[in-house]
Image (cartoon, grey):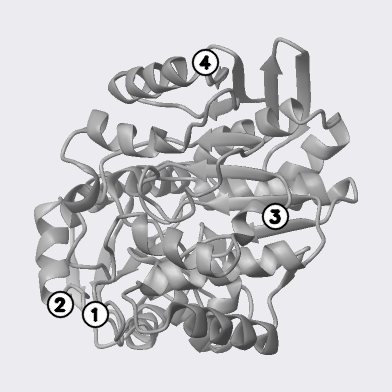
């Protein structure tokens, strides 16, 4: 952070300089599947990894942000990077970089490329950090496949104010002649993505045109020009995971994988803090009758996804424990949730300088239509109050991946 204190500074020059000093490891990594989008990147990546690994392939994966430990960001041939390996790689990158400016995300991404280049594997799954065009993962010239999950309004201060501008940044990962799988999009976003693909001569495999995925009688039905698959529902909960699974299956089919791989993708994926049911740990023990869930969604599309998931659950008194960052559209996130919630407990995110004060989150919840909203000193305090007054309630801890990470660490 002392080398470049800005947390986010989208440009390619610094990372290209360091990668050159390191001998261009990004040119030596296994074949890349590059994933951009506003929502669903991590879930889609997890499903693709499950599908590839089920067939015996070794898969590198890069994702961000981490939840409980930084090591979650770098997975080498299926295993999280070890502490000694991570320390050694970061030391090597720091030495090569010297005193030149570089951001935290840039130097750690370079460390990931070094790790991927030195560890044998069959595939590399790269998740974009922010945007796409100027994201430092976008240094791979010839990926095997690119994927753009649903694009919505988020990070406007970096990516643009309109959906079309944001979609243009995401479409920056499209490479000449490389197929691109496109998840469900608003028309304005899809137009921009398709126009960029046409300019690049990149074959498009788009939801609703070239593939479709939907739920029918408790099953996931996937269909493309090669036929129909009748699969179990994704083990990741929520109706939005149907489309994420569809994008993952479309990718696997383009890579020539069979139905067994596609089934493994939807049944074998694990992705924490995405409507994750917490069943063990101190928090669960403190409220044993409460049905406890955790979700890190933090933008209006994330709120809609959680609301749709709650709407499909058995009826049960539902409370939210919510903490958010001051850079987010808080009211937009909460508005779709309001009809499903009895009371919201607003908390400040511990140790996070950009946390929204609990009082502001509470006021936003009330303005978004929540029936009741109060503040609490911590997640544990809020949960204790709920357990005392509504011991069999459903409780969802939500609003931020940073809050989710705190909860996973404390509940570990």
- Secondary structure beneath label 1: loop
Residue 218 in view here: no
Percent position of residue 60, x then y: 71, 59
How packed is label 4: few (under 14 Cα within 10 Å), some, or many (20 or more)?
Answer: some
Q: Earlier in the sequence, mark 1 or mark 3?
A: 3
Give the residue number, with chain letter if any, for mark 4: 208
Picture quadrant of residue 371: bottom left
**From the viewer's perspective, is residue 37 above or below residue 361?**
above
Of 81 and 150, the residue lying toward us: 81
- Nearest-to-viewer mark from 2 and 4: 4
Depth-wise, is mark 4 or mark 1 nearer the camera? 4
Q: Nearer the viewer, mark 4 or mark 3?
A: 3
Q: Which mark is residue 28?
A: 3
- Nearer the observer, disc 2 or disc 3? 3
Which of the two residues, 224 or 275, is positioned nearer the viewer here? 224
Residue 178: horizontal and vertical position, in percent? Answer: 60, 27
Mark earlier in primary sequence (2, 4): 4
**Disc 2 and disc 4: Cα gap in Å?**
42 Å
CA separation, marks 2 and 1? 5 Å
Q: CA gap, disc 4 to disc 1?
A: 41 Å
Q: 19 left or right of 143?
A: left
Residue for point 61% across, 18% down: 211
Disc 2 + disc 4, Cβ < 8 Å = no
Q: Which residue lies under the disc numbered 1? A: 348
User: Which image quarter holds the N terminus?
Assistant: bottom left
Tag 4 and tag 1, C-beta contact below 8 Å? no
Asked whether disc 2 touches disc 1, contact meaning CB atoms under 8 Å apart, the reply is yes
When the figure is inspected, residue 338 is found, relative to residue 224, above or below; the finding is below
User: For mark 1, does the 10 Å Cα neighbourhood hold few (<14), some (14 to 19), or many (20 or more) residues?
Assistant: many
**Which residue position holds label 2?**
357
Taking depth in this image into account, of 66 and 200 the one nearest to the observer is 200
Q: Nearer the viewer, mark 1 or mark 3?
A: 3
């Amino acid at each position: 952070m002392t080398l470049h204190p800005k947390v986010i500074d989208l440009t390619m020059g610094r990372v290209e300089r360091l990668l050159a000093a390191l001998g261009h490891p990004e040119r030596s990594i296994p074949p890349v599947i590059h994933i951009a989008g506003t929502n669903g990147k991590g879930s889609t990546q997890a499903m693709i990894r499950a599908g590839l690994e089920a067939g015996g392939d070794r898969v590198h994966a890069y994702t961000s942000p981490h939840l409980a430990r930084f090591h979650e960001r770098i997975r080498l041939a299926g295993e999280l990077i070890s502490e000694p390996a991570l320390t050694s790689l970061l030391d090597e990158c720091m030495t090569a970089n010297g005193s030149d400016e570089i951001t935290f995300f840039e130097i750690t991404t370079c460390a990931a490329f070094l790790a991927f280049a030195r560890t044998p594997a069959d595939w590399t799954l790269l998740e974009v950090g922010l945007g796409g065009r100027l994201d430092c993962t976008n240094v791979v010239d010839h990926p095997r496949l690119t994927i753009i999950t649903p694009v919505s309004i988020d990070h406007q201060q970096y990516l643009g104010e309109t959906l079309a501008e944001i979609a243009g940044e995401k479409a920056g990962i499209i490479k000449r002649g490389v197929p691109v799988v496109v998840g469900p999009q608003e028309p304005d976003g899809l137009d921009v993505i398709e126009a960029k693909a046409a300019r690049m001569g990149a074959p498009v495999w788009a939801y609703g045109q070239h593939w479709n995925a939907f739920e029918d009688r408790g099953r996931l039905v996937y269909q493309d020009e090669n036929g129909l698959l009748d699969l179990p529902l994704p083990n990741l909960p929520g109706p939005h995971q149907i489309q994420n699974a569809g994008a993952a299956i479309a990718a696997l089919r383009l890579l020539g994988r069979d139905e067994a791989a596609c089934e493994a993708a939807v049944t074998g994926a694990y992705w924490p803090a995405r409507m994750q049911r917490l069943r063990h740990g101190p928090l669960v023990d403190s409220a044993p009758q409460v049905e406890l869930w955790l979700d890190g969604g933090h933008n209006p599309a994330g709120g809609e996804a959680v609301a749709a998931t709650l709407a499909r659950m058995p009826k049960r008194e539902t409370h939210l424990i919510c903490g958010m960052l001051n850079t987010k559209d808080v009211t937009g996130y909460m508005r779709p949730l309001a009809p499903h919630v009895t009371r919201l407990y607003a908390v400040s995110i511990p140790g996070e300088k950009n946390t929204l004060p609990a009082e502001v989150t509470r006021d936003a919840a009330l303005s978004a239509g929540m029936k009741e909203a109060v503040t609490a000193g911590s997640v544990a305090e809020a949960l204790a109050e709920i357990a005392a007054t509504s011991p069999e309630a459903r409780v969802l801890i939500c609003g931020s991946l940073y809050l989710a990470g705190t909860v996973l660490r404390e509940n570990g």
